[in-house]
Amino acid sequence: MKHNILILQASPRAKGNTVWMAEEYKKAAEAAGHDVTLVNVSHKKIAGCLACEYCHGKGNGACIQKDDMQELYPLMAEADVLVLAAPIYYFTLCAQIQAPIQRMYCVNAPAKVKKMALLVSSYSPGVYDGASAEFRDICNYWKAENMGVVTAKIDEQKTDETKARIEALVAKL
């Protein structure tokens, strides 16, 4: 089955480890015949949710804020697979990926997303529990299948072994 995959990549480092992981996922998914859109959300201006409830009243599901999230809403609405790729700076998903996740509050959950995966990198071992738990909870709340998590600490970054784990994640589609 051909999937419409959206990868939200959140590292501001152009040649960083998270960028590499997202690009490897994209290459493998395209090679398998899937349509893939990769968006670097770290370069977008996406504010946090204001908790104003406009979206659940007068807005009829539309956020009152008109920032770069407007580019993501249609992509999120069409994706059936969502991949989050984020560096771990301090024990959880970084702020750059949190903003688009939190802003989905206005629509509750992406309409078509049925599968999700997480790619995370860090210089430190043992710092993935918070991000993995949050990802698991998002999958559960959005009723999306958790396809898995690939982590890469300092000695695992940009290696053939990590590339193979990413390719195995794509193969699950």
Image (cartoon, rainbow, N blue to C red):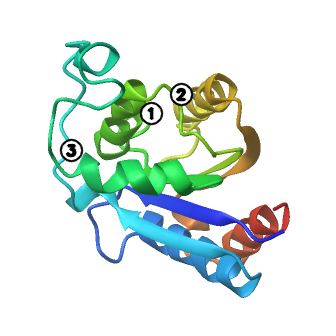
Position of the N terminus by quadrant: bottom right
Q: Return the residue found at the far bottom.
A: 31
Q: Name the mark nearer the viewer: 2 or 3.
A: 3
Q: Are marks 3 and 1 in contact (CB under 8 Å)?
A: no
What secondary structure is found at the residue carrying circle 1? loop
Tag 2: amino acid = Gly
Task: Tell me what residue is drawn at x 16 percent, y 50 percent.
Answer: 45
Query: Which residue does the numbered mark 1 point to in the structure image?
Result: 92
The image shows residue 143 at horizontal and vertical percentages of 70, 29
Tag 1: amino acid = Thr
Identify whether 66 is placed above or below 18.
Answer: above
Tag 3: amino acid = Ile
| Residue situated in front as seen by the camera: 31 or 80 | 80
Q: Name the mark nearer the viewer: 3 or 1.
A: 3
Mark sitting earlier along the chain (1/2): 1
Q: Are marks 2 and 3 in contact (CB under 8 Å)?
A: no
Q: Are marks 1 and 2 in contact (CB under 8 Å)?
A: yes
Q: CA distance from mark 2 to mark 3?
A: 22 Å
The image shows residue 68 at horizontal and vertical percentages of 20, 52
**Left or right: 11 in relation to 3:** left
The image shows residue 14 at horizontal and vertical percentages of 29, 74
Q: Residues within 10 Å of mark 3 (few under 14, many from 20)?
A: many
Query: Which residue does the numbered mark 2 point to in the structure image?
Result: 130
Query: Which residue does the numbered mark 3 point to in the structure image?
Result: 46
Identify whether 12 is placed above or below 82.
Answer: below
